[in-house]
Each structure stands twice: as structure tokens, then as C-alpha cells.
Image: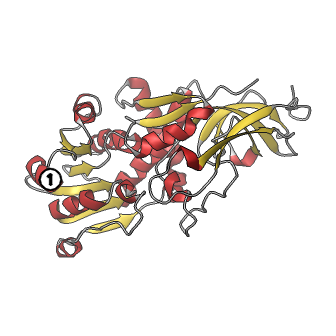
Amino acid sequence: MNATTATTNSLRSREIRLAARPAGQPGPEHFALASVDVPEPADGQIVVRNTWMSVDPYMRGRMDDVPSYIPPFPLDAALEGSALGEVVASRAESVPVGAYVTHFLGWREYAVLDAAAATVVDLALAPPEAWLGPLGTTGLTAYAALTRTAPVREGDVVFVSAAAGAVGSVAGQLARKLGASRVIGSAGGLAKTKKLLDTFGYDAALDYRQGALDEQLAQAAPDGVDVYLDAVGGDHLQAAIGALRTGGRVALVGAISGYNATTAAPGPDNLFRAAAKEATLRGMLVSSHFDLFPEWIGKAAGWLADGSLRTEQTVVDGIEQASGAFLGLLSGANTGKMLVRLEAAR
């Protein structure tokens, strides 16, 4: 089938829509499963049969109708997020039928989009799920955070929160490759902290459910911390500021501890200590670092192939389970990247 004669043959696609905006913790009632016809692609467009989709913490913010760096999800419309799939119809010479692409129209079984909004990926280089995890925006987040936002220098002590998650599981290993002398991670529960030590190469693992985090961090890094990758906020950020050495660097990547808060989440009360230490706290949006993608993929694909970068996925099957996967992500049910594997009607 060539690009000008492709057809969708009256395909149907199931999709997850935002049914209502949550106040605090979201639940199943905030999502709805719908079925729609897949339209024929216009000139320059492709139709993708999604086979994998990602759920990510930042999506919680898009459920609220508040100004942010990315628009809120509209009500009664399909949600959005990273996905990978096979092109089944194309009216774009640059992306033929049969190619595999990543794009941003997840939460649905079939996506119709401009070819320019898709990226062709090589499944011979890495398996499909890797393109949404270590080779996708989560891997890039770790790389940009530790090379640009809060650069790791030879001999640094590095602390990573949410260290068993999609970004953190890569960040700890990357910090070591960048020259860190000691890498410390935090996670919730014995299984995850053991995974940090046994699989993801951390030197020390803090269980935030077991005692004061600042005391645990002081024991793990008695001489202080040089770099902190913050995905949690709250008590984690406060503990990290307290532990920073002079000239310490913090990458503010996320604050999942406050995403479901109905009132302003408490922030650290020791910010002046950062000033006294001449520390840098810098926010980071991965979308500002897409220029690093080729560099990152060139390195990470080789590390995946030779086994020096180890990753894990938590996989849920079926579009109808996508909202449950997202809710599980917010409660810490995942180790590594949370993914949904789709089996669209053919």
C-alpha cells in the first residue's frame, strides 16, 4: 500500500476521555471509555495503531483547569500522552505504512495526526517499550537534569528522589556514568529500596516511609550532597536543602507529593539555607531540551544493548485499564516506567 492509497477501512477506536475534573485524589469516575470511528487521513497525515502508551505524573496537573506550562485536558475529549505504534495508513511520503513511530496522541487505540508530529523509531535498535521509557522523554529528563540543569561533576554525591520510578531508575545509573562518587536514592517500601541497590546501582537507599527523611539522608551522606534531582518536593526538597554542600545544585523536575493536594502544599521552610550555601535551585521542563534527544539516544541505546543501563517497566494490558494504570502511578504502584500495552481492533 503506498502513501496515496492508504485507507482506514472504517476502523473503530476506543479512547479514554476526561469525564470530570477531580478535587484532590482522582478516581475511576473521572474517566470514561468511548468508541469512535477513525477518520481517513488528510494530506500529510498518518493513522497509527497504538501498541504502547505511557502514563506520567505530570498528567495529573492537566486534569485541573488552571494555568500551567501545558494546557489542561478538555472535558469529554480523549486524553493525550506519549505513545508508540505502527502506521496503518499514510498520506505522507515521509512516513510510510509499516513504520513505527512515537507521538503524543496516546490514550486511544488509533491516532490520526500530522506526519510532522511523529518520530520514526528503529525497533532493531531497541524494543518498542524502550522508546517510551529510557529512550523517550523520561530518559531524556534524567539526562538533561544531570548534565544541564544540575550538572554532575567528578566526585559528586548525588541524591535522587522517586528513585525507583521511570526517571529516577535511569538517573542513578547516569549519575555514576557522569562521575558521581556516591549515589543515594529514596523510594517507598522494602521492595523498591532493595531494587535500588540490587538493580539500579544505588549506593544507599532511603525508605521515606520509615522515619525522618532528613535523618536518613544525613546518615547516608554525612558530608553532604552536591546534586539533588527532585521529583517529589515537600519533605524531600527540605531534606535535600539541609544536606546540600556549598555550591550544591538542585534540578526541580516534579513535586508528586503535592499533586493531589486540595490546599497549597507545604514547601520547605529552610530555603535561606540554600542562599547561605550559594546553592542553585533550577526548574526544568523536558520540552526545553529536545535538542539533546539525538545525543541521549546515541548513548543510551548502546548502554541498553551492552547491559550497563538496566531498566524495568510495570505493564498493564488494555486501553480499558489505562486509567487504573494512571491512578496506580500516582500511588506508587510502579517500578520503573508505567506503560499500557494496547491491542487495538484490526
- Identify the residue position indicated by label 1 in the image: 212
Relative side of 336 to 109, left or right:
left
Residue 159 rendering spot, x and y as whole percentages: 24, 50
Nearest the viewer among 67 and 294 is 67
Relative side of 86 to 26, left or right:
right
At label 1, counting other C-alpha atoms closer than 10 Å, the crowd grade (few under 14, some 14-19, many 20 or more) is few
Q: Which image quarter is the C terminus in?
A: top right
Q: Quadrant of residue 320?
A: top right
Relative side of 311 to 132, left or right:
left
Nearest the viewer among 332 and 143 is 332
Q: Secondary structure at mark 1?
A: loop
Identify which residue is drawn at 54% across, 44% down.
28
Amino acid at pointer 1: Ala
Residue 92 rendering spot, x and y as whole percentages: 82, 40
Residue 224 rendering spot, x and y as whole percentages: 13, 57
Identify which residue is drawn at 17% across, 75% down.
276
Relative side of 262 to 248, left or right:
right
Identify which residue is drawn at 15% across, 60% down.
243
Q: Quadrant of residue 248?
A: bottom left
Total labels: the figure holds 1
Nearest the viewer among 9 and 42 is 9
The outermost residue toward the front is 29
- Inspect this view and state whether residue 70 appears: yes
